[in-house]
Amino acid sequence: MKQSFIPAFLKLYGLPPQLLSSAPGRINIIGEHTDYNLGYVLPAALNLQNYCLLSQRPDEKVCFWAENFKENDEFLLGKISFSEDKKWVNYIRGIFWVLEQEGFDLQGINGFLWGDIPLEAGLSSSAALEVSVLNGLRALFRLDLEPIRRVKLARRAENEFVGVQCGIMDQFISVFGEKNKALFLDCETLESKLLPLRLEKEGLRICVYESGIKRELASSEYNKRRDDSSRALDQLKKFGASDYKGTTLSFLENRRKEMEGVLFRRARHVITENQRVREAVQALEKDDFRLLGELIFGSHQSLRDDYEVSCPELDLLYEVAREFPGCYGARLTGAGFGGSGIALVRKERIPAFRAKLLKEAARRKFVRPEFYEVEVGEGARANFLAEEDNR
Ligand code: GLA
């Protein structure tokens, strides 16, 4: 894959690329809408990645070509502005902008981007784009940037430049993911632990279900949920709670009558989801995939009923999965409101499960979903290209 675009780079810019950078998309196994509530998450990097070839220019100009869109972008360092008409360019401009904000001295760049992460499908193609560009620039300009600082800067670019109030999960897993491992992250302390995913022991595979519902329009709903959960916590603080992680379900239930119904449910999701993540870690440590699957189902129910971020197309996955022998667990993954779901399925049962999903989706006149196996891949990498790569 990397080889095939080097000639295109050469043709476009007249000089060979110096470096190849890559960063993965992600699935989140469990722990949804908990990152910005400073709770726990358990994502894993995908084998689907964004790639980026880069070389330095002697001037102040930044040029990018995006193969997936067949579009280019050009801007000048020191004069970086938000683009209203091309969405993808803002993720790149945001990275240059944040590096300038932090006082790094940059130079112009020629860049070439492509990737195989489905776009706007809730699989974090944007975090992968940010991280691949940032990692590449760091290597090329030898910027003094620890991995954790890269995570924070990529998130800041998305929050402050692109204007999406995401949490830290997607950038974190894109930087720190490892092959065949899930990552347990405390989003408050940023302490993390990689856990082996020994799915083959049980003959299981992770499958992605793309609902086909684009979640682009949903960012205002995402911000509403952020707002609800922070207002719910403010109410709980009046009763003596200090944060979500340290609040038990019984504490919340004792305050039920004093809280607004919606806020009570939002808080119940966050509190129970944190608990499910803790239990999922224990399940993984014991290779107890039945338990993990039940927790995954429980997460979907809570996201559907308490956090209200599901939609009929994602509920279909859950409903079919619940009844299907050989599927251990399924739920929406990422922000919800469309996008994708994941399912833990026994390998030999995947074709039948897929057929059942497609049949049910057609019966309900839904957009035809995509359903495919994925692998848990490695985190971001940046490598200088050897001379022979460029020939
Ligand atoms: C999106 C955001 C993440 C996280 C999830 C929900 O993917 O980018 O930070 O909040 O939604 O868990």
Image (spheres, rainbow, N blue to C red):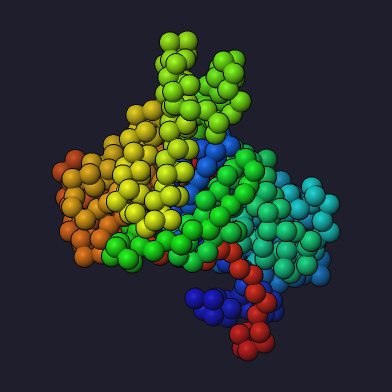
Quadrant position of the C terminus in the picture: bottom right
Q: Give above or below for 38 relative to 385.
A: above
Residue in view at x 78 percent, y 63 percent = 143
- Residue 278: x percent and y percent? 46, 43
Quarter residue 382 falls in: bottom right
- Residue 208: x percent and y percent? 35, 55
Quarter residue 364 falls in: top left
Q: Is residue 162 at all visible to an observer of this figure?
A: no
Q: Give above or below for 22 relative to 213.
A: below
Residue in view at x 39 percent, y 56 percent = 286
- Residue 100: x percent and y percent? 79, 51
Q: Is residue 1 at all visible to an observer of this figure?
A: yes
**Which of 44/48 is in front?**
44
In this view, which residue lies farthest toward the front?
Answer: 286
Position of residue 50 in the picture relative to residue 134 (left or right): left
Quarter residue 273 falls in: top left
Residue in view at x 52 percent, y 42 percent = 40
In this view, which residue lies farthest toward the top?
Answer: 258
Position of residue 149 in the picture relative to residue 221 (left or right): right
**Which of 226/187 is in front?**
187
Residue in view at x 46 percent, y 62 percent = 196
- Residue 370: x percent and y percent? 30, 55
How many numbered circles does the render carry? 0
Position of residue 278 in the picture relative to residue 357 (left or right): right
Q: Give above or below for 196 relative to 85.
A: below
